[in-house]
Image (cartoon, rainbow, N blue to C red):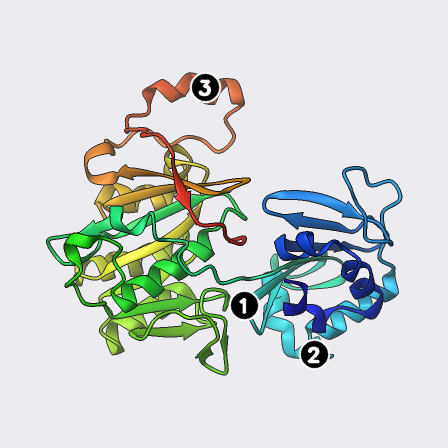
Amino acid sequence: MLNRVAHLLPVELKAVLERLPESMLEQLEEIRVREGRPLELGFRGQSRFAATDGTLRMSADGAFKPTGDLCRKLLEKITNYSLYAMEEELKRGFITVAGGHRIGLAGRTILDGGNVRGIRDIGAFNIRIAREVVGSANHLLPKLLDRSRKSIHSTLILAPPQQGKTTLIRDIARSVSYGLWGHGEIAGWQGRKVGIVDERSEIAACVRGIPTFDIGPRTDVMDACPKAEGMMMLLRSMSPEVIVADEIGRDEDGEAIREASHAGVSVIATAHAYDVPDALGRPVLRRLLEEGAFSQIVELRRSPSGFMHRIVNAESSFRGPAAREPTLTAAASGAGAAARSFERPSFANGLQRGGAG
């Protein structure tokens, strides 16, 4: 995995990472660089600190500590030596580079009228290595099929960060586009026209408008485009039968999903939430679920052996429980759990191993 981002790394950092065991390099998902603090690496949902000799340890003692000069070189490389050209990306707190790799940034924010205009004094980087896992949706997709329309149900996929959401929806888009439905009884179904709104350039990893990941032969991509605008543009111009979008949550996202739903288009979207009760605590997601914009909900989890999923039928299971306040304590949330009214089927194993998403 290191070779995918090696060109972005200063020589000193690359030298440390190249000393890691090959088996660990294959599992590498995140490289967390913090100025003057231990180098942290993420592997399949777990983290370790790296020493100069490439050994990994639970404790930060003796770990390699990136210098200010190393961080400056890293920033120059990921911005292609032009901070000004990356002004919009810096304002959002991340930069997506060729290959779909997203680099999160942290530092001192620059405010303009209370709004974030950019980031300076950047001293922390989170390099998330994108990977394509063909077949990662094989066990889930057959459970989401809409036989009446010979397509896929509108589905909301819920998970906290780095649980594989992006990897999963990329493979769903690929399978639907090819017509690889994964069910013997429906082998005659053709593929569907898929439109992807790839705001962060992570799903398709386009370079100059051309996807570098396999997203299927019937798929069109609106790259680096805000989700709401992209969905409306696809609806007006590309006649999609399925729209795919990552990390929804804003009011305008909800409006665009309603438009797609009313136009008879299936929507596959992800959102940050641990489970359905968490999603109901987010006003936009709650309204979409109440209105029936999604008929299926998938709760996604990672395990050391891969992914697990739980499917909730939104149409039959959702009865409009009161939205949970985001600030509830653990005790309060436990007390309120009995009032939430939706089915909780068991998690199913079987999703392929995949990267962070």
Where residue 294 sits: x, y (%)? Answer: 26, 48
Where residue 119 sits: x, y (%)? Answer: 69, 63
Q: Which mark is residue 334?
A: 3
Q: Earlier in the sequence, mark 2 or mark 1?
A: 2
Residue at 30 percent across and 61 percent down: it is 256
The residue under label 1 is which amino acid type?
Gly
Q: Earlier in the sequence, mark 3 or mark 2?
A: 2
**Is 299 rendered above or below residue 356?**
above
Where residue 164 sits: x, y (%)? Answer: 48, 50
Q: Nearer the viewer, mark 2 or mark 1?
A: 1
Numbered disc 1: secondary structure: loop
Give the class, few, some or many, for how many residues have Cα within 10 Å of label 3's Cα (few <14, many ≥20).
Answer: few
Label 3 to label 2: alpha-carbon separation: 49 Å
Label 2 to label 1: alpha-carbon separation: 16 Å
**Is 346 rendered above or below residue 30?**
above
Numbered disc 2: secondary structure: loop
Numbered disc 3: secondary structure: helix
Residue at 64 percent across and 54 percent down: it is 28
Give the class, few, some or many, for how many residues have Cα within 10 Å of label 2's Cα (few <14, many ≥20).
Answer: few
The residue under label 3 is which amino acid type?
Gly
Q: Earlier in the sequence, mark 3 or mark 1?
A: 1
The residue under label 2 is which amino acid type?
Asn
Q: Which residue is mark 1?
A: 100
Q: Nearer the viewer, mark 3 or mark 1?
A: 1
Residue at the extreme left: 148
Q: Which mark is residue 80?
A: 2
Label 3 to label 1: alpha-carbon separation: 39 Å
Residue at 27 percent across and 44 percent down: it is 296
Residue 113 seen in this snapshot: no
Residue 257 relative to residue 130: left or right: left
| Label 2 close to label 1 by CB (< 8 Å) | no
Residue 334 relative to residue 18: left or right: left
